[in-house]
Image (cartoon, rainbow, N blue to C red):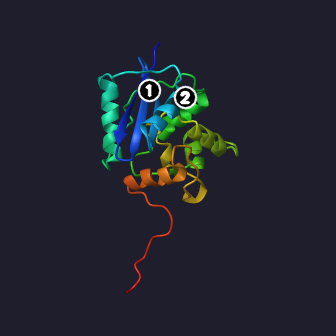
Amino acid sequence: MSTHYTVFDTMLGSAGIAWNDAGIMRFQLPSASVEATRRNLLRRAPSAEVALPPPPIAQAIAAAQRYFAGEKVDFSEIVLDLTGQDDLYRAIYAAARRIAYGETTTYAGLAKAIGRKDWEAARDVGQAMAKNPVALIIPCHRVLAAGGKLGGFSAPGGAETKAKMLALEGVHLGPKQQSLPL
């Protein structure tokens, strides 16, 4: 099955998407340049060839552009190809896709959602989120560390990008800013 990709502009920079006949297999969050996005995307989909997106992929791209422009978007119906992911990661990704726009959970909370309560479960969730092949569509940015702390983020821009994405959804972490009298 051949793999294709394209790079497109968003309000936060250049994003990328790779797909095959089964669905979207990679999503690259925005980088500062087209070349950085292309390089990051092809690192994980080296056999992908640039192509014009068919209608379902074009719709996913338009949804991502609307999302990064600040619009509430639901990605839960987008068809993914998670071939190569083990059963545990598939379960974690399915649970993560149920985290609604503007909502968050913790690594432990997501582990509990898949029926895991052992001490290694949160670590497994963290590893799955770090290896998420379709960030944004599987909303790993909505999964926080214990105590509602931001935690890590392996996308370009790291935790700052995660905070920006959460802010787009109206989620603000940390102490509330108070105005000081003049």
Which residue is pictured at 48% across the width and 34% down the height?
134
The disc labelled 2 sits on which kind of residue? Arg
Q: Nearer the viewer, residue 31 or 60?
A: 31
Q: In the figure, residue 4 lies in which quadrant?
A: top left
The residue under label 1 is 18
Disc 1 crowd, CA 10 A, few/some/many (<14, 14-19, 20+): many
| Image side of residue 93 versus residue 178, left or right | right
Query: Residue 44 has which mark?
Result: 2
x and y percentages locating residue 138 in the rendered image: 47, 37
Of marks 1 and 2, which one's residue comes earlier in the chain? 1
Which residue is pictured at 44% across the width and 26% down the height?
18
In this picture, is 151 found above or below 81? below
| Image side of residue 55 versus residue 20, left or right | left
x and y percentages locating residue 99 in the rendered image: 45, 44
Which residue is pictured at 40% across the width and 78% down the height?
179
Say whether marks 1 and 2 touch (CB < 8 Å): yes
